[in-house]
Image (spheres, rainbow, N blue to C red):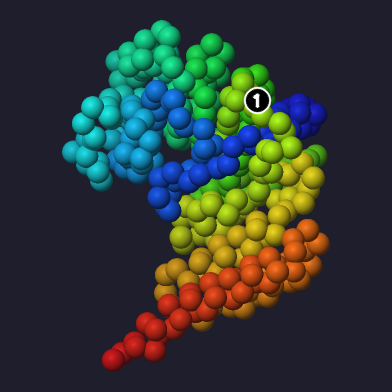
Amino acid sequence: MQPIILKESLNKLMPQPCPVNLIRIGGCRDGAYLVPNDLEGIEACFSPGVNNFKYFEDELSLRFGIKCHMCDFSSDIENFETPLINRMQSFEKKWLDIDGGAESITLEEWVDRHCGKNPGDLLLQIDIEGAEFRNLNSASLELMNKFRILILELHVPIQTINMHETLEKEFCPLLDKLSQTHICVHLRANNCCGDFVEKETGLNIPNVIEVAYLRRDRFNRDPKYYYRPQLPHPLDIPFNLPEVAPLHLNKNWLIDKRRSLESELKICKDFIVYEAEGKPRIISLSYLFRGLASCSNDKVRSFALRATLAIRLIVFHIYYQIKNLVPLLTKGK
């Protein structure tokens, strides 16, 4: 495909300042996402792709009173890690798809079944292993505009032979379409499957990227009060797979190409936690020193704040160092 086409589409995926802060929903493990804190008045969440756990949907229902509708042909209610919440959650053993099969349901049919033709604002959280492209590309703009918030896992085909064809026919058209109704406010790299650097833009594109969108009409405040994007965000989970090194989006994803001090320290903390996982061992000092260097070099934050963040990082490192040393010292006793 033409590099300029991909570049224009990727520009529409770059996170923009958000009128509300971001909150994490779904715990501290794989399946948790950052969501714009604009949930009041949302009628329901539609969540295809369950894989037998629903911590995200449980928190939406219990904490925010939002009904959640789930579907996944590969899951079974009796295997769910938590039971369905009465009158707040529903599950259908179907694929979300456009093939018209007996085992499938389209997004429009699904929404109509539970909310009718004129629902209030909705939320869509979708993780369906690449099928998001055909489902969302086939959905009408009218339907997409019913969703105030979109939380998407996009599975970019970077490891396939026909990568460029898929990017041109599915990935870029979806980004272009979503930009008509929504604005990206956060991105996060899923560390499950690696990434590649797109030469034209210098962006590192993960095989799986988590995206939070907010509908355009919600950007109705004075922009000077908007929240600047942070990559990574301090509330992001450190990794999806603990046995794989953390993966972060590079600075080229930021409009000003500048990472905040909080983001720099978040990267250091993620690697400290990663080194502490699995077999107990001495945690290296490299990321502690990197974080302290970031604190000393930052020209934006006050000295007091930089000193406070540095002390917190040192305490954080010591905590995980002790946590790992105890099993080593008591081994064999």
Check the picture and name the quadrant holding the N terminus. top right
Q: Residue at x 60, y 25 (%)?
A: 218
Q: Which residue is mark 1?
A: 220
Spot occupied by residue 299 in the image (x, y as percentages of width and height): 81, 62
**Most foreground residue, 205 or 57:** 57
- Callout 1, which amino acid? Asn
Relative placement, left or right, of 98 versus 199 is: left
- As displayed, is residue 256 above or below residue 91? below
Residue at x 56% of width, y 58% of height: 246
Rendered image quadrant of residue 11: top right
Q: Residue 24's spot in the image, x, y percent? A: 48, 46
Residue nearest the viewer, comparing 123 with 203: 123
Q: Could one spot residue 292 in this view of the protein?
A: yes
Looking at the image, is 88 positioned above or below residue 311? above
The residue under the point 54% across, 48% down is 190
Neighbours of disc 1 within 10 Å: few (<14), some (14-19), many (20+): few
Residue 184 vertical placement versus 178 (above, below):
below
- Element class at badge 1: loop
Q: Position of residue 206 (x, y in %)?
A: 61, 45
Residue at 61%, 21% in the rendered image: 217
> Along the horizontal axis of the image, is 42 left or right of 267?
left
Instruction: Classify the position of the C terminus by image quarter.
Output: bottom left
Query: Which of the two residues, 170 or 269, is positioned nearer the viewer here?
Result: 269
Could you tell whether 38 is left or right of 303 in the image?
left
